[in-house]
Image: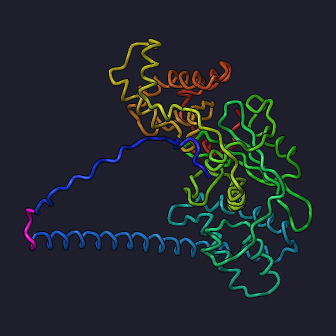
Amino acid sequence: MGDVGRTRAESATYSRPVPVSRKRKKSSKSTAAARGERRRAHTRQVRMAQSLRDVAAAHESGRAMRIELARPHAVVLAGELTASSATGTALEDDLCARLGPLLADLDERPTEEYVGPDHLAAALAGVLEDAGDGEPARRVRAALAAILPSALLADTGMESLDPEVAGEVRWTRDRYGSRFAVVAPFATPEGPVRWYLWDIDACGFIPLPVHAGFYASPEEALAAWQVGVGAFAAGGTSWRRIDDSGLLADLLPKTEEVATLGGESAEQFTEYHRCRRLAEVVLDLPPVLSPSAPETALDVGPERFVSWWRRRAWGPEPADLEVLAEDLFDSWPAAAPALFDTCSPHRVASVSHQIRDEYRDGADALLALLPAWVTWLSERTGLLPELRERALARIGAGTVPDGDLMRRVAE
C-alpha cells in the first residue's frame, strides 16, 4: 500500500562518469594500530548488542510481571464467560463488553499495579489454556482468538481465521476534514452481515478511534457517527468509496503503535482489540489507486508560513519569528501527513493544550502566533470562514483535561 502524502516519485537523469585509474592510498596506520581499532570497534558492537539484549530482557520481564498481575482478573473473567450460554458472535460481543469496564478500571490503577489490554488478553489466554479442552473453555478461547490482532495471536499461540469482508469498504469525513468514519461489512457464521464502524479523530498527535462497533446497516452506522461528530461538523456527509489507500492506512489503528495513551473510556476499551483485528483485515484488502498527494504545509515547511506572515503584515514581528514558526510546525499533528493542513476546533484545542504543557513559560508567544498559523492553513485549504472562526475560538481556551483529549468530541 503506498504511503500517500509522505513521498513523491521523482525522476532524475545521471551521466555515467568515465572510470579513472587511481593509485591506492597507503594507510598511515601501522598494522598493530589497525588491528587494535578493529578490536575496539568489535568490542563496542558486542557491548551494544548486549545492551540491546538487556533492554529486550527487561521488557519481557516487565511484560511477564504485568501478565501475572492480570491473572486474577482473567480468572474471574474466564469464569463469567464459561458460565455464559452465548456462542459465536454473541459470545465475542459479550467478551468485548466485559473487557471494557475491566480495562478502564485497571487503567486507573497506580503504575505498580497497571495492567494493559494486551497483558489482560495474554493472561486470559493462559487461564483458558489451563482450563483444558472442555466445551465451555473451547467456546471462550474461540471468541478470544476471534478478536485478537495477529501479533497477540502469535504471542499467545492461538489461531483464528480472519473474518470475511462481505462487501465494499466505505468512508466519509466531517467538514473540517480531520474526523473520519470508516465502515466495513463482515460476514457472520450466523448469517446476517454486520457493519463495523471506526470513528477516527485525527486531531491529536496520532489518529485515534474514539468509537468503534458493529451496526446492523451502513445507514445506522452513519447516523451514529453523525451524532458523535455533531450536526454542525457532520452536516451533509454520506458514504463514499475509499479513494486513498495510503490515507486509510494512516487512519486505521495498528497494533504496533503506542498501546494506550491514558484517559480511554470503558467504551473505547470495549472494542480495543477487535477494532485493531478488523482493521488488519481491511488493510490486507487490495489497495485502490491513490491520487497524487497535494502539497501540504508539511511539504513546504515553516519558512513559507513566515513569508506569508510578513506579506500580511500580521503585526509587530517577534524577534524570533522563525524559531516560533518552527516550534508551531513541530507542534502540529503530522502522523497523517495528508491531513496536516486541517484545522478543527478539537485540533486547535489539542495543540493549545500541548503547547502549554510542553513550553510552559514560552507558551504565550506561541499561542499569540497560533491565530495566524490557523488562518494560513485555512486559506491553503479553502476552509469556510464560519469553520475557521470556530477553530480560532479554541485557541488559549485553557488547559484541557487529559481525558478530554481522548473522548469522542462533538464539534
Which image quadrant for residue 316?
Answer: top left
Residue at the right extreme of this rendering: 191
131 relative to 183, above or below: below
Secondary structure, magenta segment, majority class: loop
Expressed as whole percent of the image width and height from the top left, the position of residue 53 reads 39, 73
Which image quadrant for residue 315?
Answer: top left
Look at the image and tell me in which quarter the C terminus lies: top right
Q: Is residue 241 magenta?
A: no
Expressed as whole percent of the image width and height from the top left, the position of residue 149 reads 66, 65
255 relative to 334, above or below: below
Q: Residue at x 37, y 26 (%)?
A: 322
Residue at the front extreme of this rendering: 18
127 relative to 349, above or below: below
Q: Residue at x 15, y 60 (%)?
A: 24
Which residues make up the magenta segment?
27-32
Which of the pair 7/329 is nearer the observer?
7
Expressed as whole percent of the image width and height from the top left, the position of residue 180 reads 70, 41
Q: Residue at x 45, y 25 (%)?
A: 304
Which of the pair 127/340 is nearer the observer?
340
Which image quadrant for residue 386?
Answer: top right
Q: In this image, 362 relative to 273: left or right?
A: left
Q: In this image, 39 relative to 86: left or right?
A: left
Colouring: rainbow
Q: How many badges with numbers are in the image?
A: 0
Expressed as whole percent of the image width and height from the top left, the position of residue 26 reads 10, 62
